[in-house]
Amino acid sequence: MLSRSIGLKIVVNPDDTKVRGEEDGEMHGHTVKSYWENHAGLIVNCKDTVNEEIKFHATGFNIRRNKSNNK
């Protein structure tokens, strides 16, 4: 969806470990980070930690939780 944007493309803490498969279309063969490094995305890195006391409704929809990023 972000690749279809005609505006600013911002990717926050992109994954650089999982290489995407054929089902991921244009990202096939790339990690999220490597794809956006080559497709004019603005990559932003920030500290992102998990607070176990906060419960999100997204987990009920099988949306995965972001990994902690303490860099």
Image (spheres, rainbow, N blue to C red):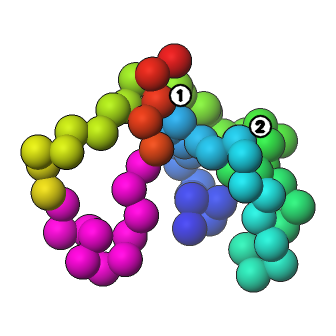
The quadrant where residue 49 appears:
top left
Is any part of residue 36 visible from this angle? no
Q: Name the residue under label 2.
A: 37
Residue at position x 75%, y 81% from top?
23
User: Are the residues tagged 2 and 1 within 8 Å (C-beta)?
Assistant: no
Q: Judge whether 61 appears above or below 34 on screen.
A: below
Residue at position x 24%, y 77% from top?
60
Is any part of residue 31 visible from this angle? yes
Residue at position x 65%, y 60% from top?
3
In the picture as drawn, the residue positioned furthest to the top comes out as: 71
Q: Is 60 on the left or on the right of 37, as rendered? A: left
Q: What stretch is highlighted in magenta?
A: 56-66
| Nearest the eye: 50 or 16 | 50
Tell me the distance, in whole angstroms, between the alpha carbons under discs 2 and 1.
11 Å
Q: How many labels does the image show?
A: 2
Counting residues from the start of the chain, the first of labels 2 and 1 encountered is 2
| Nearest the eye: 62 or 46 | 62
The quadrant where residue 63 appears:
bottom left
| Nearest the eye: 47 or 27 | 47
Where residue 58 sits: x, y (%)? 26, 68
Q: Is 46 on the left or on the right of 18, as rendered? A: left
In reply to whether residue 59 is colored magenta, the answer given is yes
Q: Mark 1 points at which residue?
A: 44
Quadrant of the image containing the N terminus: bottom right
Q: At label 2, which amino acid type do we have?
A: Glu
Q: Judge whether 3 appears above or below 14 on screen.
A: below
Q: At label 1, which amino acid type do we have?
A: Val
In the picture as drawn, the residue positioned furthest to the right comes out as: 29
Q: Residues within 10 Å of mark 2 (few under 14, many from 20)?
A: few
Q: How crowded is mark 1: few (under 14 residues within 10 Å), some or many (20 or more)?
A: few
Q: Element under label 2?
A: helix
Where residue 68 sits: x, y (%)? 43, 36
